[in-house]
Amino acid sequence: ACLGLDRLLTSVGFDGAELQTERPVTGLQEDWLEQVPGARTWSPSDPQLHSLTVSLRFGSVELDRVTVRFGLRTVTTSDSRILINGEPVLLLGVNRHESHPLGGIYLPHQQLIEDLKIIRELGANFVRGAHYSQDQRFLDLCDEFGVLVWEETMSWQPSFEDLQDPIFMSQQLQMLDETIDASVNHPSVI
């Protein structure tokens, strides 16, 4: 049993509502499925976000707590069209680099907000984050603004030789794994 415990009380908070379950501890990793009433889907026109808090307790002692914000949506294709939650979405977008005259590749939070306001004022619903994984603060804001994101790994115009190089490809795959891990809960990333 994990930490010498054989049972663990799991408290799951979803948008302020709390569900509690008690389950046996069988190892260092536990997977489970919960039905959550009232869940709403995220879309560019209605960017509904949820929060999930999981706390692990032994008796009255809280051992750990984590809160994650996320959106629920499906992304599929049909007849060369992208569907969000089964509905076709026409991507109207811009290409974007993270660059600021005062901060270089670091953009102040307010500048990220201003960028997204301009993107929305243009009538765009899509951003290509050029050549690298995007700042998580920017992805949080895209989730809130309902702006879809194409996120890339760190590479710009790789040569044919680069694509044949096992070290280059290994680094790209590692970056892809890290990008997915960092962005998996962002409904804006498609």
Image: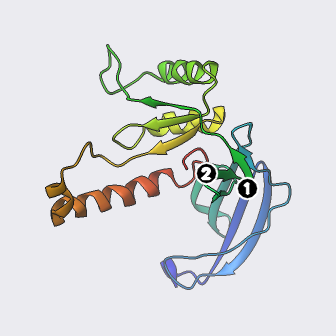
Which residue in the protein does label 1 denote?
13
Residue 32 placed where, x, y %?
Answer: 66, 75
- Specify few, some or many for label 1: CA neighbours under 10 Å numbering under 14, 14-19, or 20 or more: some
Q: Secondary structure at mark 1?
A: strand
Please, what is the three-letter code of the amino acid marked with disc 1? Gly
Q: CA distance from mark 1 to mark 2?
A: 9 Å
Q: Which mark is residue 67?
A: 2
- Specify few, some or many for label 2: CA neighbours under 10 Å numbering under 14, 14-19, or 20 or more: few
Taking depth in this image into account, of 135 and 76 the one nearest to the observer is 76
Taking depth in this image into account, of 81 and 170 the one nearest to the observer is 81
- The answer to whether 8 is drawn above or below residue 162 in the figure is below
Q: Secondary structure at mark 2?
A: strand
Taking depth in this image into account, of 2 and 170 the one nearest to the observer is 170
Name which quarter of the figure residue 33 lies in. Answer: bottom right
Residue 138 placed where, x, y %?
Answer: 50, 34
- The answer to whether 38 is drawn above or below residue 102 in the figure is below
Q: Which mark is residue 23?
A: none
Image point 56% across, 23% down: which residue? 119
Image point 72% across, 76% down: which residue? 22
Q: Is residue 69 left or right of residue 86?
A: left
Q: Is residue 1 left or right of residue 18?
A: left
Image point 24% across, 58% down: which residue? 171
Q: Farthest residue to the top: give it.
A: 102
Name which quarter of the figure residue 65 lies in. Answer: bottom right
Taking depth in this image into account, of 2 and 119 the one nearest to the observer is 119
Name which quarter of the figure residue 66 lies in. Answer: bottom right
Please, what is the three-letter code of the amino acid marked with disc 2? Thr
Image point 74% across, 36% down: which residue? 45
Residue 27 placed where, x, y %?
Answer: 51, 83
- The answer to whether 101 is drawn above or below residue 19 in the figure is above
Q: Farthest residue to the right: give it.
A: 38
> Residues at badges 1 and 2 in contact (C-beta under 8 Å)?
yes
